[in-house]
Amino acid sequence: MSSRRNFIQQTALGLAGSVAIPLLGRATSGQPGSVESSAAASELMPVGVAGYTFAKFDTDQSIAMMKKLGAHNLSLKEIHLPLNSSDERIKTDMAKYAAAGINVYTVGVIYMKTKEAVDQAFQYAKKVGVGMIVGVPSYDVLDYSEAQVKAYDIKLAIHNHGPSDPLYPSPKDVYDRIKDKDPRVGLCIDIGHTRRAGVLPEQVVKQYRDRLFDLHIKDVTAGVESGKATEIGRGIIDFPALVKALKKIHYKGVCSIEYEKDMTDPMVGISESLGYFRGVLAAEG
Amino acid sequence: MSSRRNFIQQTALGLAGSVAIPLLGRATSGQPGSVESSAAASELMPVGVAGYTFAKFDTDQSIAMMKKLGAHNLSLKEIHLPLNSSDERIKTDMAKYAAAGINVYTVGVIYMKTKEAVDQAFQYAKKVGVGMIVGVPSYDVLDYSEAQVKAYDIKLAIHNHGPSDPLYPSPKDVYDRIKDKDPRVGLCIDIGHTRRAGVLPEQVVKQYRDRLFDLHIKDVTAGVESGKATEIGRGIIDFPALVKALKKIHYKGVCSIEYEKDMTDPMVGISESLGYFRGVLAAEG
């Protein structure tokens, strides 16, 4: 199954955690004879979920929802595993994800305003066992963050948050500040906030391909600050163009769906979103 | 919006009912500036829902679910509006669909074993105001059904139900019996049952294009009788190939999603299914 191969691929890329993860196939299509070209098409671009999607739910509920979605890659948000968690708590939670066949491939988004916050984030990432942090370092700790990237050999993917973000409204604001830094410092492009900043995701993924580590995939109703989160396919983002661009740059990271509408009852909307994105992946495969 | 244009297109095709339907845009993306190429891509192939999907729900619940799904074309099942309904009841129900912006484009699947059943089906279709019946006439009332197609000028799309169907297991079993009949007698190809019969949907839609009036869109876990219904994209049907074939034959009918898994709680699965199909349509558009 594609998820199994995705996992192996990610492990090879060094993005997967050190926790042993059972090589489970997709829950509903693991039976013999169900492998088809359409399913295989998305192998180069594994789909995941950004943990913020489950902000209103606990770890067990999040895992149950991931299983129902057939999603195997998670960007772990500290809402579910606090940054100051004990080693024991981290071990317990990571074992739960592993038992469910969920690959925690990164942590974040972690905001870092001080050197202490940067230290905490990297120690946390190391304990969790991921090879990447999705973070937002303030400008004055950027150099210090880069030093920790080198010290820990853990990547840092900086996240853009749209027009109201005082630090990184769009991917260019990230790229311009990191382009001369260690190559392990890069971007987590949030395509919704990117589009709200008036920038086309399908263009910036190509433009910043050399530093593109992660993606937050969503849709928005308008390409302005007031644009609202919506189900993928119901907004204005051109997903076929985005997937074409990702294929063109041979994007090897995860496409993590982040669904921010109906946060207290997200399953219907995230299912539609995940379905749409997988459909585009299959067709463009 | 595409749904609006789809409606106009269907009206032009004579498939829409006589009830005046408000020209509503999609509920969540009707604001200015939200029209994008990806949304427009599916215009040639409007998406709908086969009413059997809502077998466990009443009319009001079905309408609420259609609205949440952003689906505007319904194949009305007699579970929701019985074949012997009074004119008053039919009028009341059709007004509900119209008020919700839902285009009841056909009725069915209606099983017809006797001439009386054929008469009832055509009278019902006329009162409901549709230009097509999706039905299963027994062999000995096929000629009589054709006569009613001519008398009422209402199309008949015969539905295939897979290996266990004694009458029409696969589309060929329909086509061979109707190919010399009035051109208003044709097929509603159920792609799930077709695939369970070991036949590839992407091939038969091309093969029987001259008589292809309607589609029941679903996915199955295996291409044998025991294949089970599953979310679109999780099974074995090659949707990109199907959509390519439908585009090639300039299919002008509706693609009605029929979701038969989790029938007491279908929204998550049908949302994923609808999302996947729309994603493929957008990408192949």
Image (tube, coloured by chain):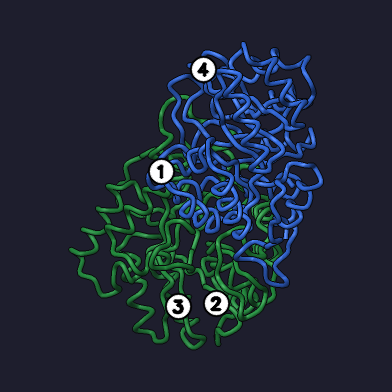
Chain colours: A blue, B green
User: What separation in Å lies between label 3 and label 4 (alpha carbons)?
Assistant: 66 Å
Give the residue at mark 3.
B145
User: What separation in Å lies between label 2 and label 3 (alpha carbons)?
Assistant: 19 Å
Estimate the x, y position of residue A196 in percent, counting from the top left. 52, 22
On the image, which quarter does residue A15 sit in? top right
Counting other residues with Cα less than 10 Å from the Cα at mark 4, is it few (<14), some (14-19), or many (20 or more)? few
Tag 3 and tag 4 share a subunit: no
Asked if residue A194 can be seen in this view, the reply is: no
Instruction: Give the residue drawn at x 72%, y 38%.
Output: A131
Mark 2 or mark 3, earlier in chain: 3
Q: Nearer the viewer, mark 1 or mark 4?
A: 1
Tag 4 and tag 2 share a subunit: no
Give the residue at mark 1.
A56
Counting other residues with Cα less than 10 Å from the Cα at mark 1, is it few (<14), some (14-19), or many (20 or more)? some
Tag 2 and tag 3 share a subunit: yes
Give the residue at mark 2.
B161
Counting other residues with Cα less than 10 Å from the Cα at mark 3, is it few (<14), some (14-19), or many (20 or more)? many
Q: What secondary structure is found at the residue carrying circle 1?
A: loop
Q: Amino acid at mark 2?
A: His
Instruction: Give the residue drawn at x 48%, y 55%.
Output: A60
User: In the rendered structure, the residue with mark 1 lies on which chain?
Assistant: A
Q: Nearer the viewer, mark 1 or mark 3?
A: 1
Tag 1 and tag 3 share a subunit: no
- Report the quarter where the N terminus of chain A lies: bottom right
